[in-house]
Amino acid sequence: MTAAERQEAVRLLEESLQRLASVTSSLSEEQARWKASPESWSVLDTVEHVTLVETAMVAGIRDALTMPASPETLEKTKGRDERLWRAVSRRAVKVQSPELYAPARRFARLREALTRCAEARRESIEFVTTTPHDLRAHAFPHFILGQMDAYQWVVFLAAHMERHIAQIEEILLAAPFPAAGPDLRSRATGVS
C-alpha cells in the first residue's frame, strides 16, 4: 500500500462519516424510527447495520493480516478498486444483508447508534493510519464480491457507508415521512 493509497483511504472514510453525520444531524427519534413499510429499514436500523458491518470488517481485516502475505493476492485483486467503489456505493442493485448484520434494535436511540458508528469509524481510520502492514498483500473474500485485498476492504467500508447514506436519503424522501424541524427533504436532495 502506497502513502497515496493510505491517504485516499483515510479521506474516503472521513468524508463518508461526515456525510452520515450531516444527513442525520437534525432527525428526531420519531423520524429515526420511521419506516416506509413494516419490512423496510428505518434510519436507526440503517445506522445500526453500518456500525455492525464496520466493526466486523475491520476485525476481518485484522485477522487477514495475521496470515502470511501472499504475492498472488495483489495479482488477483489488482485494478478492482474503482469498480468496487461503484458497485458498493450505488444502490442500483439491492443486496440482502446477512442475518448477522441485520438490525436487531441494539441501540435505543439514534444518537447512541451514531456515536458508536463514529467510534467504530475513528477506530478504522486509526488502524489505516498506523498499520505497518501492506494491506495489498492480504485478502479475504466478500460473500458476493469475491476476493478483496485488505485495502479494498477499507474502500468497501467507505463505499458501504455511502450506499447506506443514499438509503437514508431515500427514507427522508419517502412519503409520509414525519415532518419536524428544518426541511429534511431539501437536505436529502441538496435543494433549499
Image: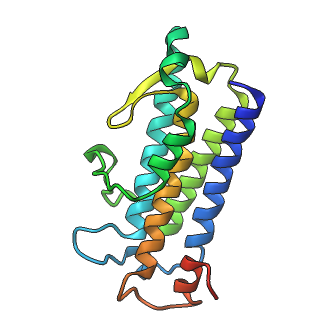
| Residue 28 to residue 16: above or below | below
Figure quadrant of the C terminus: bottom right
Residue 19 coordinates in the image, percent (x, y): 62, 63
Residue 79 coordinates in the image, percent (x, y): 56, 30
Residue 108 shows in the view: no
Kindly identify the residue that appears in the image at 39 percent across and 85 percent down.
177
Kindly identify the residue that appears in the image at 50 percent across and 24 percent down.
77
Figure quadrant of the N terminus: top right
Residue 44 coordinates in the image, percent (x, y): 42, 66
Kindly identify the residue that appears in the image at 55 percent across and 71 percent down.
24
Kindly identify the residue that appears in the image at 50 percent across and 11 percent down.
72
| Residue 64 to residue 51: above or below | above
Nearest to the observer: residue 163 or residue 115: 163
Extreme residue toward the right, this view? 3
Total labels: the figure holds 0
Residue 62 shows in the view: yes
Nearest to the observer: residue 75 or residue 46: 75
Residue 168 coordinates in the image, percent (x, y): 46, 69
Nearest to the observer: residue 141 or residue 101: 141
| Residue 47 to residue 81: above or below | below
Left or right, residue 117 beside residue 40:
right
